[in-house]
């Protein structure tokens, strides 16, 4: 097993297209939940990092995927830690209400991938992973909860082909 697989964290990006601007009264309940949900994530077992705009408490003003699209980019110690926060905490109640604030997804909106411990992914890197998932489906470099890969599989996938092995292809 490589050092990467031993020292890997799980990165996740999810994107959501707003039905209404963040300052619209119809979006106010979502905005009111941002601080408590972010605080819960920050204190959750296995949480490592989340993207925030400089000088702000969250990343809602950052719009790297379009003016009406908000992004959530986080890093976790394990897939289990992210799963537990997502589906076994107060975050689940927010997810149940997402149709009030966000358009229905017509393509993949969540992507997971392994990063070396200590690496903080950029929004550009994250959007590339999402584009890869949308274009090619799940792989060790871009996957979902339903089609996941281990850090070991991702490390093997990321290893360069042996010299002189022209038949070796990255999936």
Image: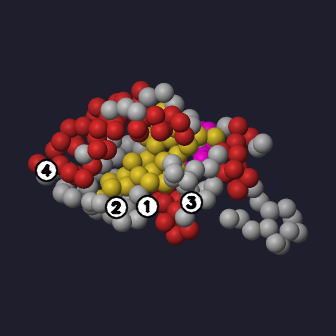
Mark 1 neighbour class, 10 Å CA radius: few under 14, some 14 to 19, many 20 or more: some
**Number of marks:** 4
Please identify, in this view, whether the residue under mark 1 or under mark 4 is nearer the observer: 1
Classify residue 15 by image quadrant.
bottom left
Q: Which mark is residue 105?
A: 2
Q: Is residue 169 above or below residue 48?
A: below
Q: Can you identify the residue that label 3 sits on?
A: 138
Pinpoint residue 46: horizontal percent, then vertical percent.
51, 31
Question: Is label 1 in contact with label 2 (beta carbons under 8 Å)?
Answer: yes
| Dot 2: element | loop
Q: Is residue 3 above or below residue 140?
A: above
Classify residue 151 by image quadrant.
top right
Q: Which mark is residue 126?
A: none
Q: How far apart are the two marked residues, 4 and 2, measured between alpha carbons?
A: 19 Å
Q: Main SS of the magenta segment?
A: strand
158 vs 128, left or right, is right
Question: Could one spot residue 78 in this view of the protein?
Answer: yes
Q: How far apart are the two marked residues, 3 and 1, measured between alpha carbons?
A: 10 Å
| Dot 4: element | helix
Q: Can you identify the residue that label 1 sits on?
A: 108
Q: How far apart are the two marked residues, 3 and 4, measured between alpha carbons?
A: 35 Å
Q: Residue at x 24, y 37 (%)?
A: 33
Q: Which mark is residue 26?
A: 4
Give the extent of the magenta segment. Answer: 113-118
């Amino acid at each position: 097993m490589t050092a990467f697989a031993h020292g890997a964290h799980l990165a996740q990006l999810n994107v959501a297209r707003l039905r209404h601007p963040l300052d619209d009264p119809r979006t106010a309940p979502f905005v009111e939940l941002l601080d408590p949900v972010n605080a819960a994530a920050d204190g959750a077992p296995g949480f490592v990092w989340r993207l925030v705009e400089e000088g702000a408490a969250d990343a809602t003003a950052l719009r790297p995927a379009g003016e009406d699209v908000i992004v959530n980019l986080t890093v976790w110690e394990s897939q289990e830690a992210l799963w537990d926060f997502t589906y076994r905490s107060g975050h689940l109640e927010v997810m149940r209400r997402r149709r009030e604030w966000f358009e229905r997804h017509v393509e993949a909106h969540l992507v997971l991938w392994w990063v070396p411990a200590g690496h903080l992914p950029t929004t550009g890197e994250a959007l590339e992973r999402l584009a890869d998932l949308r274009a090619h489906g799940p792989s060790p470099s871009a996957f979902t909860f339903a089609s996941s890969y281990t850090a070991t599989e991702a490390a093997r996938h990321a290893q360069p082909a042996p010299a002189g092995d022209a038949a070796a292809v990255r999936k």
